[in-house]
Image: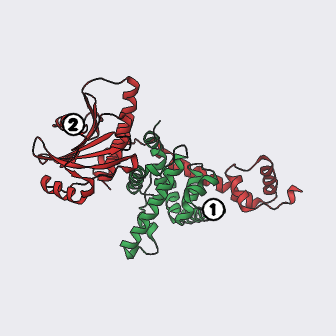
Amino acid sequence: MSDETPINDAELQAYVDGRLGEERSQVVQAWLATRPEDAERVAMYRRLGEELRRAYDPVLDEPLPEWLAVRGGPRRRWLRFARVAGWVALGIAIGAVAGWEARDVRPGVSARGDTGETMARRAAVAHAVYSPEVRHPVEVGADQEAHLVAWLSKRLGTQVRVPKLDAVGYSLVGGRLLPGENGPVAHFMYQSNQGSRITLYVRTNAATNRETAFRYAREGNVSVFYWVDGKVGYALSSADISKETLLSVAELTYQQLNP
Amino acid sequence: MSEAERMVELIPRLRRYARALVGDRAAADDLVQDTLERAWAKLHLYRRGTDLRAWLFTVMHNVHVNKVRAARSTDPLDEGMPELALRAPQGDALVVRDLDRSISRLPAEQRSVLLLVTLEDMSYDEVARTLGIPIGTVMSRLSRARDKLRAMMLGQASAKLKVVK
């Protein structure tokens, strides 16, 4: 019976790929034995597969970070998250370090001048000061977001963006203007349904125009992820969510700021 | 392991596929970068516990299709041969170059099926899901891709023999 069943093309392909059941494979094999042209074709298909793998498998072993590091520009920035995620996992494995800790996510980059630690510290303090505020957490509420953005953009001298963090459960409460080391700072506050708060500290940094990796710092009970993107420095602070959760918020913040 | 770490682990495979798909090394790495950026931005759409590899390759497929389409719409000269325009003939060995060139001449939709099956060793079902096409289409494209590739390789071989003579 079975040897009268016609071999369809899909079966032939599956045979080439070694994905046909034992029984049908035997049928195909017997069928090919009587058809040298088809047998030749199948052999060629298999050889093409081998050639393809031989040609492209070496790509798997090519060193990875080179093109990510060398090319520069905004395109490699996504990797920060991957690196930070790895770093956070490592940090958790080693055990939490108490008190102030600030370290570069990418070793070797830290030597480049201002590390943003001051910004992180100021952001942590601003968080500690404003996030417990019940009556006046912000100067301008989220209901006037357009006004808030226009006002802070004007004061900072750069177009300020307000990330939407609803996807991770935080909605905008509003924002305020703060004094920073070198001038005005925009400070945005977000709140979850459970009442936990996250603040985003945004300063312009006219002195240098560069990028840094994501960095993590902790001041007292406030965790901060901070980074510099061109002229603008960002610091995201929270006192009551885990490092990992804060990282996921930082990731989203970054995406929202760099659509 | 987090999605980010798993994504990083999958980068070499994305690069291998991209290299074969696009041909040119720089263009392939561009594709990988764009894919990773997009995947990162869309990570919230990825459902935990599902196949991250298939998801990433889907993202890459979409990014690639969009790139080809963009190349087509911004450069009217590309009309009709956008795929070829994206590729530059290169390769370390003659065999690779021949193979590379032959693959580049396959219609894009056949190429991706063949590469996912051959390089990624995806099941036909996974390929169907990754590319968002019915499994019957996977099979027919695979078959046509192999036929064409075989014909091209045979053609090249006979052309070389003629030259040698």
Instruction: Please name whichever residue, A1 or A142, is drawn nearer the observer in this view of the structure.
Output: A142
Instruction: Please name whichever residue, B16 or A221, is drawn nearer the observer in this view of the structure.
Output: A221
The red-tinted chain is: A
- From the viewer's perspective, tell me whether residue B94 is left or right of residue A12: left
Q: Quadrant of residue B141?
A: bottom right
Please state which amino acid type lies under the numbered disc 1.
Pro
Report helix, strand or loop for mark 2.
helix
Please state which amino acid type lies under the numbered disc 2.
Ala
User: Hey, which residue is sitting farthest right in the picture?
Assistant: A1
Mark 1, residues whose alpha carbon is within 10 Å: few (<14), some, or many (≥20)? few
- From the viewer's perspective, tell me whether residue B156 is left or right of residue A243: right
Task: Tell me the shade of chain B.
Answer: green
Q: CA distance from mark 2 to mark 1?
A: 52 Å
Image vertical order of residue A210 relative to residue B82, above or below: above
Instruction: Please name whichever residue, B100 or A113, is drawn nearer the observer in this view of the structure.
Output: A113
- Read off the residue under disc 2: A120
- Read off the residue under disc 1: B134
